[in-house]
Image: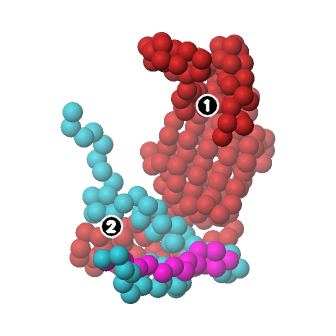
Chain colours: A cyan, B red
Amino acid sequence: MASSAAVPFWRAAGMTYITYSNICANLVRKCLREPFKAESMNREKVHFSLSKWADGKPEKPVLRSDAPEV
Amino acid sequence: MLRQASRLISRSVTAASSKSVTARAFSTELPSTIDSTFVESWKKVAPNMDPPRTPSSFMKPRPSTASSIPTKLTVNFVLPYASELSGKEVDMVIIPATTGQMGVLPGHVPTIAELKPGIMSVHEGTDIKKYFVSSGFAFLHANSVADIIAVEAVPLENIDASQVQKGLVEFTQKLASASTDLEKAEAQIGVEVHSAMNAALSG
């Protein structure tokens, strides 16, 4: 039973569906008219801090605060 | 914990007696989830306690598929940040599936369709509402309920045509000059999305 459907081009290039979907959504948002564009950019803002742990202690955290992505 | 015991025991006794009549009334597709060998050995070990219920016995039975095709399609159209349409009864929905524009009427074959960037139109009588959908999925159920989920969906009036043209030119250039597979993929996504928006605005 070989795989039937050809994989989509983004999957062949190593991209996952979520990445593909988010890129599409961002492109659409960038092409909106003014009041809607500002609203959507506002809505999509993220702010998080990520820290890896080693030996039971947190290392230096990486802070990401938005900046429109992609 | 034991305060609830009498309530739980009496509830499960009545449920067991009425289970066969009510809980299974609509589950024409669900096989019996009661494992009789398990129940037998349970009764031998603990005859005074009811056998434990499994998660599947707590599940609500599937909505029955009507024998005659309903006249209206119920649409639930959701975005991550808002519920655009919730339980709206419409005549037809045309969704931009990867296999092409798919028209969904009541009584459509159950389908799961992946959506590509394109126009989704909701037809209600003479009213047609169009949205540009960035990508997503559409689940069409046997009981004429359509669940459509999209990451971003905008009415066509909200799209800026000049931005779309600029983006199309930019990504066509990027596609020509891309080197790695990933860059090519990103540029091609850009070209696809922008050409879909272009087609949506002009068509």
Depth check: B72 or B58 in front? B58
Task: Identify residue for label 1.
Answer: B58
Name the kind of residue labelled 1 in the image. Phe
Subunit under mark 1: B
Percent coordinates x, y for residue B168 in the rendering:
46, 74
Q: Is residue B99 magenta?
A: no
Depth check: A25 or B124 in front? A25
Callout 2 and callout 1 share a chain: yes
Percent coordinates x, y for residue A21 in the rendering:
46, 62
The answer for how far apart the CA atoms under marks 2 and 1 are is 45 Å
Subunit under mark 2: B
N-terminal of the pair, mark 2 or mark 1, is: 1
Q: Is the residue B173 above or below the residue B125 in the image?
A: below
Badge 1: residue crowd in 10 Å (few <14, some 14–19, many ≥20): few
Where, by quadrant of the figure, is residue A50 drawn?
Answer: bottom left
Look at the image and give the residue range highlighted in magenta: A39-54
Q: Secondary structure at mark 1?
A: helix
Depth check: B138 or B118 in front? B138
Q: Count up the numbered dots.
A: 2
Q: Is residue A44 magenta?
A: yes
Percent coordinates x, y for residue B112 in the rendering:
50, 40
* Residue drawn at point x = 68 percent, y = 60 percent: B82
Task: Identify residue for label 2.
Answer: B185
* Residue drawn at point x = 57 percent, y = 27 percent: B53
Name the kind of residue labelled 2 in the image. Ala
In the image, taking residue A6 as reference, residue B15 lies left or right, namely right
